[in-house]
Amino acid sequence: MAEAIALVGCKGPGQEAEYLRILSAAMPEERLIPFRTMDDAARAAARVAVVANPDPAEVAALPGLVWVQSLWAGVEKLVGAFDRPLPIVRLVDREMARTMAEAVLAWTYYLQRDMPAYARQQRDRVWRPHAYRKPSDTTVGLLGLGALGTAAAERLTGAGFRVVGWSRGPKAVPGLETFHGTDSLPAMLGRCDILVCLVPLTPETRGLVDARRLAALKPGAALINFARGPIVVTEDLIAALDSGHLAHAVLDVFGVEPLPADSPLWSHPGVTVLPHISGPTDMDSAAATVAENLRAYRRTGQVPDGVDAARGY
């Protein structure tokens, strides 16, 4: 039997036991051992680690690693964290893309159908209908056209929304008008009634949605951030909401999670706070993807396609 695979980064014994059960069922030919229970010899022998948002220091304590398989799509904590090149394989999972696209559509409807306004009216005991706005009269801009953005675009266009998309480099998506590069970003933003952030967090995207980019949105536009908190500059977002330029923001991700109790976002009337639930990992589906990657590696010796360290994803 091949050397054991290290399982790194679970949140507590309950999650660790669940992940071990599901992953072991998906690949019974492998031995998975939690990092915390591995002795020095086992840590030295491990060639592969399966990680769930781990402490990079624990991954670095496995000196023989050949590659790392993440159970999350986001790997920003790991990129550049080691003193040697170490391939990091993101979770690219169809079920996660479907779940995220479902969330994008649901919260786009929430904004398109004026749900924040009706919630405020209920609190104030105000009975006032708002004029209906068709999906075909609503332009949704997708910031990011990877697997998640492409799946979201399909759901949105299927529901009748006008959709435009932006990516760092050129990308063609059937039925979608696309923009690429920072020079084209203002033109895309100027089309948006709703902007959805789905880009990975990299040095280039940190602070990407700042005061200048928010000002480029249509007056009265709304924002959905399902990517990473630091992509949106919180102070600039609050200022855009307070000025009335931005109507509402749905935020599922934050620079610090859980969101601190003293954050002004909790009580801001223009903000809906979600506890990072838009694209949860489906462990059964994720385990099948991880098992497929490991079997291919055992068979061929080739590490699966990983993160481009220069791009950060």
Image: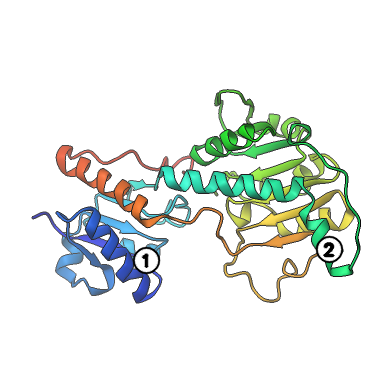
- The residue sitting at 68% across, 46% down in the picture is 108
Mark nearer the N terminus (2 vs 1): 1
Q: Secondary structure at mark 1?
A: loop
Residue 174 appears in which quarter of the rendering? top right
Nearest the eye: 81 or 90? 90
Q: Position of residue 147 (x, y in %)?
A: 49, 38
Q: Is residue 116 left or right of residue 233?
A: right
Report the mark closest to the observer, 2 or 1: 2
- The residue sitting at 27% across, 65% down in the picture is 20
Q: Secondary structure at mark 2?
A: helix
Residue pointed to by mark 1: 9
User: Badge 1: few (under 14), some or many (20 or more) residues near its Cα, within 10 Å?
Assistant: many
Residue type, mark 1 in image: Gly
User: Badge 2: few (under 14), some or many (20 or more) residues near its Cα, within 10 Å?
Assistant: few
Residue 135 appears in which quarter of the rendering? top right
Residue type, mark 2 in image: Arg
Q: CA distance from mark 2 to mark 1?
A: 40 Å
